[in-house]
Image (cartoon, helix red, strand yellow):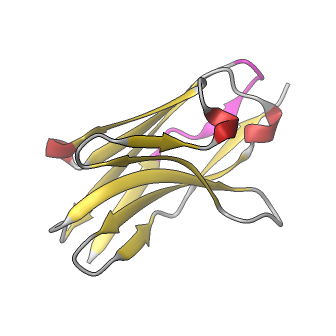
Amino acid sequence: QVQLVESGGGLVQPGGSLRLSCAASGRLFSLDAMGWYRQAPGKQRDLVARITIGGSTNYADSVKGRFTISRDNAKNMVYLQMNVLKPEDTAVYYCNAHFSWNDRDYWGQGTQVTVSS
């Protein structure tokens, strides 16, 4: 099976920065994309950023220019550099991995990001 482990969440003041990391392990054949989603209490889980194995990226409009997703294919890791954080960025951030062979998505446990003064 596939396991995703996130790290890097925490409490930060508005305007600050955090860097999230996610490591994928297990059966990773046909892993074709990894990304980050976030979910606030009572809200839908929404895409933050996504990157394919070839390096193509896409971002939610709300984070463009502030967040940067990157990956290390050799290490099966994905990162999210979050700058100029705002209170509305507060959420649980989940690592996601997509596999093309079965068109399945797998999720990490999530890491809390809180932006508050």
Extreme-bottom residue of the structure: 102
Residue 26 percent coordinates (x, y): 21, 68
Indicate left or right for 13 with 25 as reference.
Answer: right
Specify the quadrant of the image occupied by residue 77: top left
- Please tell me whether residue 12 belongs to the stretch shown in magenta: yes
The foreground one among 34 and 17 is 34
Q: Please name the residue shown 70% across and 27% down the image.
A: 85
Q: Please name the residue shown 26% across and 59% down the image.
A: 32
The foreground one among 99 and 95 is 99
Which region of the structure is painted magenta?
7-15
Indicate left or right for 52 with 65 as reference.
Answer: left
Indicate left or right for 78 with 45 as reference.
Answer: left
Q: Please name the residue shown 23% across and 62% down the image.
A: 31
Q: Is residue 56 above or below residue 41?
A: above
Locate the C terminus by quadrant. Answer: top right
Q: Is residue 84 above or below residue 34?
A: above
